[in-house]
Image (cartoon, helix red, strand yellow):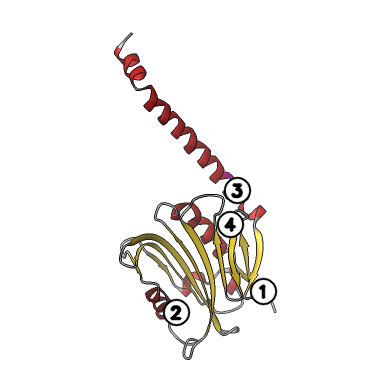
Amino acid sequence: MNAETNIFIDNIFEWGILTLSIIGLAYAAYVIKNERSNFLETAIPLDFKRFLFKIPSWWSNTYNDENHLVFERTDTRYDWKAHFRWFSFNEGDISKDLQEAFAEIIKDKNIVFDTDTSVIKNPTDFSSHPAFRDTEPDMIRVEGTATQDLEDRIYYDAFLIRDKKQNGFLFCESRSSILNGMLEGPYFEEVLLQVEKVKN
């Protein structure tokens, strides 16, 4: 037997683990690819505070009250949650700078974004968004890696929408470990980019 064959036989257990890992990764890629292609076809419609969402069919609604919804992946062990919260205006909120309103919410959550990886999109970036075709866009988005409570490293994506007709803010957030943010993050983004207002 040559040296290459001896190396293979001597390390057959390690080669087995490597082979199984590659098969597992290929299967995961196949599942993720199918989820993406089927997302809009199988999405579940949701009307929350007169906003119409298309929720991925694999998200489980684990909490639901009048002003707060929570979604998780209960079919996996992903460290990921999405929250949809409604806040009625306090005095001055109707004219408050949207970045200031967003910063106040984030400060209350003890979240500090990494300045080198964070992306901020202002109201003008959403001028063609379906929810704001007939009204002035009033939405801000910030996403990127961050630290929460001075120690937890997270991937965080959040949208803040001001609805002057209903006198409140809709705050939607996706919080996960940094690795898991890449798995559900694109779907959370798509849910918000597809949202529409209920027509009166």
- Marked residue nearer the N-terminal end (1 or 4): 4
Q: Which amino acid does label 4 sit on?
A: Trp
- Marked residue nearer the N-terminal end (4 or 2): 4
What is the chief secondary structure element of the magenta stretch? helix
- In the drawing, what numbered circle is on residue 98? 2
| Residue 85 coordinates in the image, percent (x, y) | 53, 73
| Residue 183 coordinates in the image, percent (x, y) | 48, 51
The crowding category of the residue bearing disc 1, from other C-alpha atoms within 10 Å (few below 14, some 14 to 19, many at least 20), is few
- Marked residue nearer the N-terminal end (1 or 2): 2
Which residue is more in the foreground, 83 or 51? 83
Query: Horizontally, is 84 left or right of 100 in the view?
Result: right
- Marked residue nearer the N-terminal end (2 or 3): 3
- In the drawing, what numbered circle is on residue 59? 4
Please tell me whether residue 36 belongs to the stretch shown in magenta.
yes
- In the drawing, what numbered circle is on residue 37? 3
- Considering the numbered disc 3 on the image, is that residue within a helix, a strand or a loop? helix
Split into 4 quadrants, where in the image is the N terminus? top left
- In the drawing, what numbered circle is on residue 198? 1
Q: What stretch is highlighted in magenta?
A: 34-38
Distance CA(mark 1)–CA(mark 2): 22 Å
Q: In which quarter of the image is residue 66?
A: bottom right
Distance CA(mark 2)–CA(mark 3): 34 Å
The crowding category of the residue bearing disc 3, from other C-alpha atoms within 10 Å (few below 14, some 14 to 19, many at least 20), is few
- In the drawing, what numbered circle is on residue 66? none
- Considering the numbered disc 1 on the image, is that residue within a helix, a strand or a loop? loop
Q: Which residue is drawn at 39% across and 25% down?
A: 13
